[in-house]
Amino acid sequence: MFEIITKPKNSLFSKEDINKAKSLNPKELEDFTEQKSIAILSNIQRVSEKIEEAERLTREADNVKRDWTDYIPPVFPFLRGDSKTEKRSKLNTQAIALHNEAIGEMNNLIQESIRFTTCSALFGLRMIETMSAMMVGGFESTDGNLIQLTKEGKKHANAIIQQAENFLSHQEKMKRQDEEQDEQIQSNKKSIWELQKRLEEQDKIDENQTAQIEHNRKLIKDLEQELDEKDILDESQSKDIKSNQESIAKLQEESQKLQEKINQLESQVHKGKYGLFISIGVTILAVVAIVLNFVIKT
């Protein structure tokens, strides 16, 4: 954003200077920024003096007046000097040429200085501090002379400082955005971790529920099997009860018949000589009938 596309001629700063500005320790950086600030401001002052000279020539052209040679007749051209118009034209031509040359140099100087002072945030900050102090208090040139920037020079130096400040402001904004993005990323990571944890806990709950469901299914299946077996047992017992009831009814029927037979035999006991033996036999049959009846009920 702040770099120029083409490198100016007679560049003040090499690629090595830019790389060096990014890797100096604090003391080296202080000395380096002072050296480069002097180079920038010295050139600004030099070019500003050209601009001011061009403006002086322009004012001089505006103030050109006629002199006595303007009144010499044209027939004596060797006695005549430049006319007022010719003097003004020459002065304006010189002023324009000098002004254009100075503006071109100043544009290149400002662009290159901006490119250099914004090569890193830390270096840019140091350059702003150093150049601002030199603009107020002046600075000593390489030949030992104390230089105070002219109004024109301060105007162009302020342009460089303003661009450097814009660069630092942009860098600070980008830094805050990066920090906010980092915070958001960390927050998202935490949210994702918590979500994963909840999902893992939910998976465990689902596994436990699935195991409990399978256990309940097995219990239900076993219970159904027991109920089926009980139904079969009940059916078998019902058949046995029915069979016993039928056996008891039959036994009762047989007992009734036997009782009737006993009664008949008892009536005949009194009539025959075998009455005693018959009575004993009847008693034995009665006992057998009682035992059988007990066994069947059991």
Image (cartoon, rainbow, N blue to C red):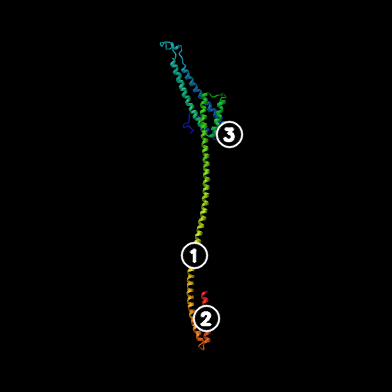
Query: Residue 140 location in percent, x, y?
Result: 57, 25
Q: Dot 2, crowdedness within 10 Å: few (<14), some or many (≥20)?
A: some
Residue 190, compared with residue 258, is above or below; it is: above
Q: Helix, strand, or loop for circle 3? A: helix
Q: Helix, strand, or loop for circle 2? A: helix
> Does residue 187 appear in the picture of this structure?
yes
> Does residue 12 appear in the picture of this structure?
no
State the separation of the CA atoms marked 1 and 2.
44 Å
Residue at horizontal 47 percent and vertical 25 percent from the top = 103
- Count of labels shown? 3
* Mark 1 vs 2, N-terminal side: 1
Query: Residue 42 location in percent, x, y?
Result: 53, 26
Q: Helix, strand, or loop for circle 1? A: helix
Q: Dot 1, crowdedness within 10 Å: few (<14), some or many (≥20)?
A: few
Q: Which mark is residue 26?
A: 3
Name the residue carrying label 1.
Answer: 227
Q: Does the residue at mark 1 contact the one at mark 2 (Cβ under 8 Å)? A: no
Q: Dot 3, crowdedness within 10 Å: few (<14), some or many (≥20)?
A: few
Residue 274, compared with residue 235, is above or below; it is: below
Residue at horizontal 49 percent and vertical 65 percent from the top = 227
Q: Residue furthest left?
A: 75
Give the residue type that dot 3 points to: Pro
Closer-to-camera residue (226/34): 226
* Mark 1 vs 3, N-terminal side: 3
Mark whose residue sits in front, 1 or 2: 2
Give the residue type that dot 2 points to: Ala
Closer-to-camera residue (253/29): 253
State the separation of the CA atoms marked 1 and 3.
92 Å
Query: Residue 231 location in percent, x, y?
Result: 48, 67
Query: Residue 83 location in percent, x, y?
Result: 44, 14
Name the residue carrying label 2.
Answer: 286
